[in-house]
């Protein structure tokens, strides 16, 4: 049974509040209404609640304000968490409206604490090839999937988006009675999987492979049914990227031999939204379509983030929160790059300089760490990469813009943090869309299982379900 946040006991009420929150003007603004790169163009800082910006501006260092925000929505943080080592959190004067907003965000995120359950010891030949994170994920997922197969009497497993096949290989090696089919769109990934299977002594009769794009096509469904030979199958995926999970769920719902599904999503920035040219896009459930849910590319990118895993600020050595540099630098390289990008975007807009790709996406600027020695060096490198002639913006003008906006680094950093702070609620929206879809398709035992340790594997929500029960067969119930 789905574990909702502690404040909720109704799926409808929870979904209403979750979707309502992401539709508020503030959340819309920080998750794409105003892209952080356009912050100076559209006065994004000034459009936040004034009491919030005044309070943040009172902090001795914006990095502490960033960490306070992160700690406030982290499900693993307690009330005594410090904003920096050795100093209490500076929250005495935090605006009540900000505290309420942060508490709401935290209360709406699906629980992320890993459920208890077994792991499986993987063969040394496989462990040597996997990073610690991957081996922990595979050992947990393999144990969970095997438990479902035992309970359901399933002996065939289809691993979609299998990559190098570590999950498939582990299942085939550890449980010789299982028959596995690995499907991936990459010829090189499948070739690597075949080679590794041969080195482990796993015959093709136990581990088959296909190079196919998993696009929801009926042709692949037919091939799966032919491979199954009338036997029940389980569909699995470890980190199904973008819209891959949505296609997998449609195969689960539409292919008769697939009796159960367990899949973890990731890379939400590659999801395709619903549009007249792509009707199957997000959201896929009637429940969220009826509520008019949409997510911007910025929101989808935010769902890929995990600010609670960012480096904590060390005021003695420098770097603030963010996926940037290690200790010992005077300021965050990430924050400086972000600031310089925002200032240059403002200059381009003021001077009518248009840069972009044919499809409207933001271009890759191609700046390097060494270009951050000064704003002028950064801007000239970016202009060269973007094909902007240097005589359009003089060195004197670059220096003037840096003087005018250089003090905004803290503002830009906080705007960025606010955006990624929404990661868990956005991912909860995506997960609930898929949950509702399965229910609408008649699935039973639908659940969203926090399968991994979120501190190690932030994308740890596994969607599981089974086909509608017939006869005396019981729904999925795996001890965790």
Image: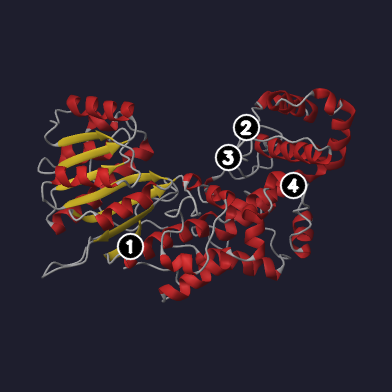
| 118 w.r.t. 326: above or below | below
Please indicate whether residue 38 sits to the left or right of residue 203 in the image. Answer: right
For the residues labelled 4 and 3, the Cα–Cα distance comes to: 16 Å
Kindly report which numbered mark, 2 or 3, lies closer to the viewer in this rendering: 2
Q: What whole-number distance in Å separates the C-alpha atoms at marks 1 and 3?
A: 35 Å
Mark 2 and mark 4 lie on one chain; the one further toward the N terminus is 2
Colour scheme shown: secondary structure
Disc with the residue nearer the chain's start (2 vs 1): 2
Disc 2 packing (10 Å; few <14; some 14–19; many ≥20):
few
Query: Does residue 122 appear in the picture of this structure?
Result: no
**Residue at point 56% right, 49% down?**
297
State the residue position of label 4: 410
Q: Which mark is residue 364?
A: 2
> Would you name the residue on which mark 3 appears?
323
Say what secondary structure mark 2 lies in. loop
Identify which residue is drawn at 23% across, 41% down. 121
Numbered tag placed on residue 438 in the rendering: 1
Residue depicted at 69% across the width and 51% down the height: 414
Name the quadrant containing residue 102. Answer: bottom right
Element type where label 3 sits in the image:
loop
In the rendering, which numbered label is found on residue 50?
none
Left or right, 257 with reference to 12: left
- Depth check, mark 1 against mark 4: the one in front is 1
């Amino acid at each position: 049974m789905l574990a909702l946040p502690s404040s909720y006991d109704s799926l409808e009420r929870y979904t209403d509040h979750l979707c309502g929150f992401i539709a508020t003007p503030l959340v819309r603004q920080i998750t794409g209404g105003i892209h952080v790169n356009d912050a100076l163009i559209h006065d994004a800082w000034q459009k936040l609640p004034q009491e919030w910006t005044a309070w943040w501006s009172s902090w001795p260092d914006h990095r502490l304000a960033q960490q306070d925000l992160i700690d406030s929505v982290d499900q693993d943080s307690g009330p005594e968490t410090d904003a920096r080592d050795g100093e209490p959190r500076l929250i005495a004067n935090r605006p009540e409206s900000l505290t309420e907003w942060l508490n709401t965000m935290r209360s709406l995120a699906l629980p992320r604490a890993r459920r208890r359950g077994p792991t499986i010891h993987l063969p040394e030949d496989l462990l040597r090839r996997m990073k610690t994170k991957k081996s922990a994920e595979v050992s947990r997922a393999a144990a969970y999937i095997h438990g479902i197969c035992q309970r359901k009497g399933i002996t065939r497993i289809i691993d979609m988006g299998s990559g190098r096949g570590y999950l498939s290989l582990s299942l085939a090696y550890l449980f010789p009675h299982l028959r596995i089919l690995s499907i991936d769109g990459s010829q090189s990934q499948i070739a690597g999987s075949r080679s590794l299977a041969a080195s482990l002594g796993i015959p093709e009769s136990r581990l088959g492979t296909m190079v196919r794009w998993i696009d929801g096509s009926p042709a692949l469904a037919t091939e799966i049914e032919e491979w199954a030979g009338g036997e029940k199958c389980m569909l699995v995926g470890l980190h199904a990227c973008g819209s891959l999970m949505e296609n997998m769920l449609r195969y689960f719902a539409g292919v008769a031999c697939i009796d159960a599904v367990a899949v973890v999503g990731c890379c939400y920035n590659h999801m395709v939204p619903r549009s007249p040219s792509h009707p199957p896009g997000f959201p896929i459930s009637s429940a969220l379509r009826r509520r008019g849910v949409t997510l911007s590319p910025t929101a989808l990118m935010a769902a890929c983030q995990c600010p609670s895993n960012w480096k904590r600020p060390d005021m003695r050595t420098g770097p603030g929160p963010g996926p940037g540099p290690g200790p010992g630098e005077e300021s965050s390289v990430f924050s400086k790059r972000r600031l310089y990008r925002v200032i240059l975007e403002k200059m381009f807009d003021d001077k009518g300089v248009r840069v972009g790709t044919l499809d409207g996406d933001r271009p890759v600027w191609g700046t390097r760490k060494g270009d951050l020695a000064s704003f002028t060096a950064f801007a000239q490198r970016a202009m060269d990469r973007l094909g902007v002639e240097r005589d359009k913006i003089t060195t004197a003008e670059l220096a003037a813009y840096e003087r005018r906006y250089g003090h905004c680094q803290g503002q830009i950093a906080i705007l960025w943090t606010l955006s990624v702070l929404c990661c868990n609620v956005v991912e909860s929206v995506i997960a609930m869309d898929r949950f509702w879809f399965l229910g609408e398709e008649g699935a039973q035992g639908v659940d969203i299982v926090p399968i991994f340790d979120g501190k190690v594997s932030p994308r740890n929500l596994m969607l599981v379900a089974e086909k509608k029960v017939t006869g005396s067969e019981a729904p999925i119930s795996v001890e965790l």
